[in-house]
Amino acid sequence: MSAPPLAGLRVVDFGQFIAGPAVGQILADMGSTVVKVEPLVGEAARSAGALGDAMVAAHNRDKLGIAVDLRHPRGLEVGQRLVAASDVVIQNMRPGVMDRLGLGPGRAEVLNPRVVYLSITAFGADAGPARSGLDIAAQAESGMMSVTGEAGGEPQRIGFTVVDQATAYTGAMAVLAALYRRERDGADAAAATIDTSLLEVALHMQGSAWVQMFQTGVEPVRKGNGYPSAAPAAEVIAVGGGQIVLSAYTPLHWGRLCEALGRPDLVDDERFATNDARLANRESMRACIGEALGRRSPAEAVEFLSGHGIVAGSIRSYGEVASGPDAARLDSFPSTVEGPVGSYRYAAPPCHFGGDSPRESRPAPQIGEHTEVVLAGLGYARAEIDLLLADDVVRAWSTPDTPSM
């Protein structure tokens, strides 16, 4: 099997919760050596119960874990050595925290003139240290929650940390672009400082909605299921034993849907003949589609519609997804690993390179699980490591089968 695409790349990850660690996870999945840096008591997510445990497990696989007190002068030296030895630095602390520690992008460039430094904040680096925030705040302040939920109901959050996840992909993409530029420029390459924020990503994710608002002067509002300006688009249809979602809003696809359902008369029905008419009569349109699909199960309805070139999908629960044929076919949830939260399965990386077989994954590290290995790799002698441990500058977790850097 060929080496992973980012084999040999060294990353130091000062992230916590999701957005920062998830960038490191993406780079680790592509073969990078990623060192996760935590305080002696572990990152904040480790004290957040089952939700925090899941965050740590999901976004820190295949990383080397070191626990160090960066506020201690000798701990800061460890952090600085890590930065000096790495190609990429990732951090999502509150604005100003890394600068105060002595590990901000300016200092990182001095330590490592070719380093790629990624900073993730909630609302932008210039928002100030008091403006901390998580995924939900970005969903709220980006307008995202205002368009999510039933018409007339209260705003709803999207049911998972969509902004954190999108920010991680954005950050990883920017890091890879900076690394490409570094390789292109060769000896002339300078350090690259990248800033992104949850709010900026949340705004960017809604690109077509902003264009439509600025073009029409009409603000998007909550309308429940179905796309607000097209029909049938993202329509939830009840079928036998469940629900499906379908879209067929262009004239071509609307006509194709009506033919497939054995209702060609609906094409010229004045209630449905145009997009505006279908929007005005959406409930009647949904009822006609559901009645025509009859008692087909969700799987049968999706197979039938897909066979006629109509976009459709079964609405599945998490359990149905995990046990379903698509997850098995794509190997979406690899075999169980043993980690800091016990046995668990994780969602596999979504990219595949040249047909390579998936690598066996290590679970997220315990607090300080690889401290001694990482320090040795930075050039610390055994006596120095023992002194750092004795003085509570670093913390180590004894474990067998510790991988090398």
Image: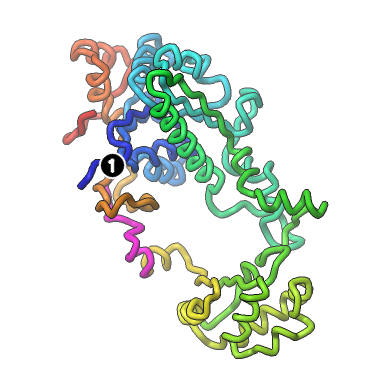
Q: Which quadrant of the figure contains the C terminus?
A: top left
* Left or right of 184 on screen, residue 269: right
The magenta stretch spans residue 13: no
> Which residue is nearer to you in this view: 157 or 198?
198
Q: Secondary structure at mark 1?
A: loop
The magenta stretch spans residue 330: yes
- Is residue 69 at all visible to an observer of this figure? no
Label 1 neighbour load within 10 Å: few <14, some 14-19, many 20+ = some
Residue at image coords 67%, 84%: 288
The magenta-colored residue range is 325-339
> Which residue is nearer to you in this view: 91 or 196?
196
Q: Position of residue 43 (x, y in %)?
A: 42, 31
Q: Which residue, given by chain and number where applicable, does mark 1 sit on? A: 4
Q: Position of residue 69 (x, y in %)?
A: 39, 18
Q: Position of residue 269 (x, y in %)?
A: 75, 85
Q: Is residue 384 above or below residue 15?
A: above
